[in-house]
Amino acid sequence: MLSERAATVLNVLVDEYLQSATPVASDEIARNLDQKISSATIRNTMAQLTENGYISRPHVSSGGVPSDLGYRYYVESLPGAPQLPMDLRERVDRDLAQTEPDIGAWSKRCAAILSKLTENLAIVTAPRAQFPRLKRIQLVFLQESTALLVLVLEEARLLRKILPFGNKVDQVQLDLAASRLNDSLGGLDRSQMQSNRLELNSLEEQVKEGSVSLMRDAETTEDQEHYTDGLRLLLSQPEFSRGELARNLVQLVEERVLLGKVLNGAPESENPAVVIGSENRDEFLNPFGVILCQYGAPQGVGGTICVIGPKRMEYVAAIGGVRHLSVFMSQMVHGIQSKSAE
């Protein structure tokens, strides 16, 4: 447990380092303290903080840099639940209100807003359910014996598949088949669809089988639809001037595997979780700070909003931005769920 003086010195040091990205000297801390403390006393306090692992110092006479433990103490010391300023929240809400009323468009726009707010990389996953439910089936005629099968799920996801038939079909037949299946299968999950005992003709049976297959794929796929923004902003930070780290990060984003590393072992919480440096399970993420929050609605429909940046990030803005946008996305998903239930 840190003394009041040590906690004050540490938090001022972290604040200064967030702005400068250079080691913070005792005289800089002295200038930014509300109370009068001598540089000698601050140097002694910094020595104690170094010994206890809260800061690192390349040399005894050099300034201090926060360690992972120092950042953790700083984050835990933030008063209350960090929020965006009211004027910024109103600006974000106006921006989102002008976005096309589509869950994919909202997810993409949230990533863009969050990356700009934090000047770091933002990732937003589109909502998905553990056991998705069918909202409706659509069939679109392509050629004489082929149609496009489109499933609209209650979580606002679309699944598509080319469906070949043994015989010629036309749009009228396809509409009739979709209408009958929607009456019987709408609102069901994959296992309920599969066990539903309907007397179906050959065309309807093929559409049902194709729909069950698509729903099974939706349950088992590990690839979450997600949107990223702000990679250029993240790479402009001084921590990523080393070419190898930057190249590896770009590769992970392009190969769409960074999200899996971020979510690996991440805590599930309705409040923003902050994972700093070595607290990340994946070794690649040790140079980073990650702030993420789950959003969603009843029945397990939801996704994740997160910011990835250097450990030296503006935690108040990042936590407040993640919190505000996760509340917005939860409201959007809940609205979609309510309309589906009507």
Image (tube, helix red, strand yellow):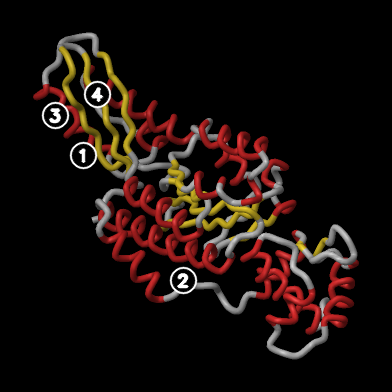
Percent from the top left, x then y, of residue 180? 18, 33
Q: CA distance from mark 2 to mark 3?
A: 49 Å
Q: Are marks 2 and 4 in contact (CB under 8 Å)?
A: no
What residue lies at 22% left-to-right and 15% top-to-bottom? 146
> Looking at the rendering, in which quadrant would you find the N terminus?
bottom right
- Answer above or below: position of 280 versus 145: below
Q: Which mark is residue 148?
A: 4
* In this rendering, the label closer to the viewer, 4 or 1: 4
Q: Which mark is residue 183?
A: 1
Q: CA distance from mark 2 to mark 1?
A: 46 Å
* In this rendering, the label closer to the viewer, 2 or 4: 2
Percent from the top left, x then y, of residue 117? 46, 60
Q: Residues within 10 Å of mark 1 (few under 14, many from 20)?
A: few
Residue type marked 2: Leu
Q: Residues within 10 Å of mark 3 (few under 14, many from 20)?
A: some
Report helix, strand or loop for mark 4: strand
* In this rendering, the label closer to the viewer, 3 or 1: 3
Residue type marked 4: Leu
Quarter holding residue 165? top left
Earlier residue among tags 4 and 1: 4
Report helix, strand or loop for mark 3: helix
Q: Residues within 10 Å of mark 4 (few under 14, many from 20)?
A: some
Direction from residue 127 to residue 36 in the image, left or right: right
Of residues 220 and 232, the one nearer the viewer is 232
Q: CA distance from mark 4 to mark 3?
A: 12 Å
Q: CA distance from mark 4 to mark 1?
A: 20 Å
What residue lies at 38% left-to-right and 47% top-to-bottom? 108
- Answer above or below: position of 152 versus 310: above
What residue lies at 57% left-to-right and 39% top-to-bottom? 258
Quarter holding residue 35? bottom right
Residue at the spot of label 3: 175
Report helix, strand or loop for mark 1: helix
